[in-house]
Image (cartoon, grey):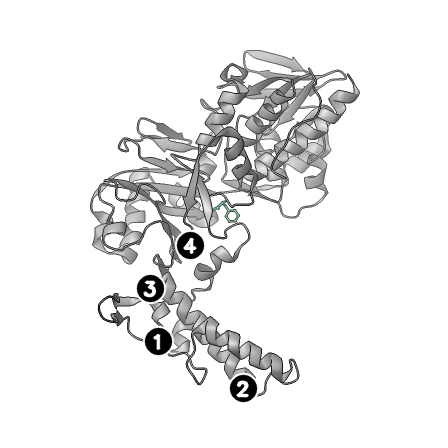
Amino acid sequence: PGDFSLRGKAAASVVILGGGVAGLTAAYELGKAGYDCTVLEARPRAGGRSLTLRRGDRLTEENGPAQEVTFGEGVYFNAGPGRIAQWMLAIDYCRELGVPIETFINNNAQAYVHTNGRTVRARTARADMYGYIAELLAKATNLGALDRTITKDDQERLLEFLRRFGDLGPKHEYDGSTRRGFVRNPGMDGGVPIPPPGSLHDVLAAATGRSITNDFGYDQATPMFQPVGGMDAIVRKLEAAVGPDRIRTGVRVTKITNLDDGVEVAWAGGAVKADYCVATLPPHLLAAIPHNLGAQVTSALRTPVPVAAGKIGLEYGRRWWELEDRIFGGVTETDLDITHIWYPSHDYFSDRGVLVGYYNTEREAELYAALTPQDRRRKAVTQGRKIHGDKYGKDLLSSVSIAWERQEHIKGGWVRWPAFDSSFTLLQRPAGRVYFAGDWLTHLIAWQAGSMESARSAVTQLHRRALQSQ
Ligand code: PHE
């Protein structure tokens, strides 16, 4: 299913609006089939949200100061996408383009869960919740509460499973488990397990539910993957394959005119006419560009709601999370406004490392976005100290933070459709000679795979038509 090629050659010209993952994938696939493509990108660099920051980069932001990235040599921060599920098209493009991938650890039992002011290892939170749930269900079974629901035989099978699921004792009681972890690890002796769990009430009141179920999701199941050296390896390879001469940066489109025999696209100081257009800009930005595609298209483009998203990269000169907390990759889930802390899944034991100190959306993202970079960092460190203690504030070398809704020509982390309704499906079809593409046109919003699926769909439709009119 991953392999894709348009069948048959066509020589039509296509102007592609936006040099993000959707635009570059469209240009790449059309290029393979013989099309003459031009990509117009408003930002100084192609890639869109697939942005990896390194030493020497300068990150600008609307209504905010520019940030200079001063990371050490070889250190990077994926400011946009950071993880890929195994089934996603981004994996296929990594293979096709020769981008090496490595494991992205998105579930680490050794990472923490921080809720209601308390910090425990993820393994402990899980063991306690599974343990007590298993105990309760076993109790209910043994009291006959399931007698009308399942047979005695199935009750036995259920109990057998619950013993394993919760690591229950002989009377089906949850009494703690070595799964919770150790204060002193086993070795020459059995070690010292961490003190027994609190009551069922305490465990329920800790509200760890969201934290311990994240990777149950189809798109978050472990293991996930990342390109070696930074997520932007994918867009750099796509760029190279498309041909840098076909990608015009710094071009902000001001008008899209659908004609009988082509499409004209204009910008300040220039215009281009092509046989077809693939428009991949975020819908809320596309809606604001004068066009003659009709009021229905405009109203459909205005339907999805931009979602704020933010991240901060904290560069440390000592990988204390590995040395002291023994956390090698993974994510700490919190109910704080930072939401998550990500530990790097690469370059273990090296001198430096970048933590994602917050990765949040909506209200929490807007809260941090409103602060100066220094205050974002200060706040992120204050929150991180609640989990990791004082060392979180030490050995900090540099930081850089992004508020996606303040990124010029992007203006959002992603979008949310109030409903996948007729506006959504309308834009999956061309308006005249203009085709739309982007993660926002798929059920894989906020995934590069969505942009890629959408680009494939648009170029497939376009190609069918071009072959017919040849
Ligand atoms: N793809 C992004 C991530 O992995 C955003 C996202 C999160 C999208 C969860 C869907 C579900 O964080």
Q: From the viewer's perspective, tell me whether residue 101 is left or right of residue 386.
A: right
Dot placed on the residue nearer the N-terminal end, 3 or 2: 3
Dot placed on the residue nearer the N-terminal end, 4 or 2: 4
Eyeballing the image, is 390 above or below 269? below
- Element marked by disc 4: loop
At label 3, the amino acid type is Val
Q: Which of marks 3 and 2 is in front?
A: 2
| Residue on which the image places disc 3 | 120
Q: Which of marks 1 and 4 is in front?
A: 4
Dot placed on the residue nearer the N-terminal end, 1 or 4: 4
Residue occupying image coordinates x 61% and y 26%: 29
On-image quarter of the N terminus: top right
| Residue on which the image places disc 4 | 107
Q: Which of marks 3 and 4 is in front?
A: 4
**Any atom of ligand 1 within 8 Å of the CB at mark 4?**
no
In 3D space, how far apart are the residues under numbered discs 4 and 2 (Cα atoms)?
34 Å
Q: From the viewer's perspective, tell me whether residue 48 is left or right of residue 324.
A: right
| Residue on which the image places disc 1 | 198
In 3D space, how far apart are the residues under numbered discs 3 and 1 (Cα atoms)?
12 Å
Check if mark 3's residue and mark 2's residue have beta carbons within 8 Å. Answer: no
- Element marked by disc 2: helix
| Of the pair 147 and 250, the residue shown nearer to us | 147
In 3D space, how far apart are the residues under numbered discs 3 and 4 (Cα atoms)?
15 Å
On-image quarter of the C terminus: top right
| Residue on which the image places disc 2 | 142
Image quarter for residue 75? top left
**Any atom of ligand 1 within 8 Å of the CB at mark 3?**
no
x, y percentage for residue 40?
55, 20
